[in-house]
Amino acid sequence: MRNLAVVAALALTTPAWGAGIGTTVGVGTGAVVGLGYSLNADYPSTSMGFFPSFDLRLDPLIIQVHALETLVSLSNDEIFLGANAYYILARPSFQGGWEGVVAPGGGVDLFGNPFGLVVDAEVLFGIQYQGDIGVGVYVVPALGVLLGDVDTALVTGGTVQFSVWFGG
């Protein structure tokens, strides 16, 4: 835990990095708040509804944590823990302060009743405006594996994400 605090402190104090906090909602079948991963009817959707993520942006990293989904799952006597992380590799500039984004990354979703773990690779493609308030629209295809009590399967999906953040 101490090492994580040191890394976080260094990341937040390094002038080359910008820090931003925001939220993302997505629509689709996968990654952020999709309508479901599982190819097997025995597993619940890895997403219980249309919930925004909590985003931490430490340029060039984007980390999305699905905190609201976790709270809702606990109230339904289930468990869901999920997070995604992306590393921005390319950021071509456009007119008016807009920029493109290409960021490979991945996600991990853990859910129970029955137990399942989804690990996937994703690439975030999109366009964003980064000022005091940032906004972005992204397409995020995903390919991964479902490991669980009932089955193991290859899973595919993708989302369209809409993101808003402050700072950065």
Image (cartoon, helix red, strand yellow):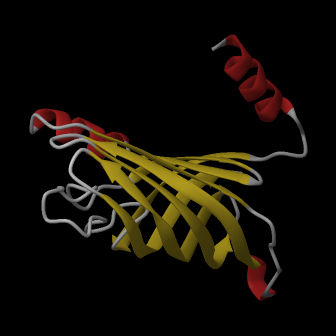
Quick one: 61 or 112, which is closer to the camera? Answer: 112
Give the residue at x 68% y 22%: 4
Q: Residue furthest top?
A: 2
Residue 36 locus on image (x, y percent)? 26, 66
For residue 132, which quarter of the picture? bottom right
State the quadrant of the N terminus. top right
> In the image, what residue occupies the spot 64% across and 79% down?
127
Query: Residue 46: image x %, image y %?
Result: 28, 55
Residue that lies at the very extreme toward the bottom in this rendered image: 95
Tell me the residue at 46%/71% (across/down): 161
Closest to the observer: 112 or 160?
112
Taking 43 as reference, is 96 above or below it? below
Q: Residue at x 31, y 65 (%)?
A: 37
Q: Is residue 156 above or below residue 51?
A: below
- Residue 70's place in the image compared with 133, above or below, is above
Left or right of 3, for residue 153: left
Choose between 40 and 17: the one closer to the eye.
40
The relative height of residue 4 versus residue 144 in the rendered view (above or below) is: above
Horizontal and vertical percent position of residue 63: 58, 48
- Residue 162: image x %, image y %? 46, 70
Q: On the rendered structure, is 88 left or right of 84?
A: right
Is residue 41 left or right of 38 when viewed as pictured?
left
Horizontal side of residue 28 vs 107, given as left or right: left
Q: Residue lying furthest left in this view?
A: 76
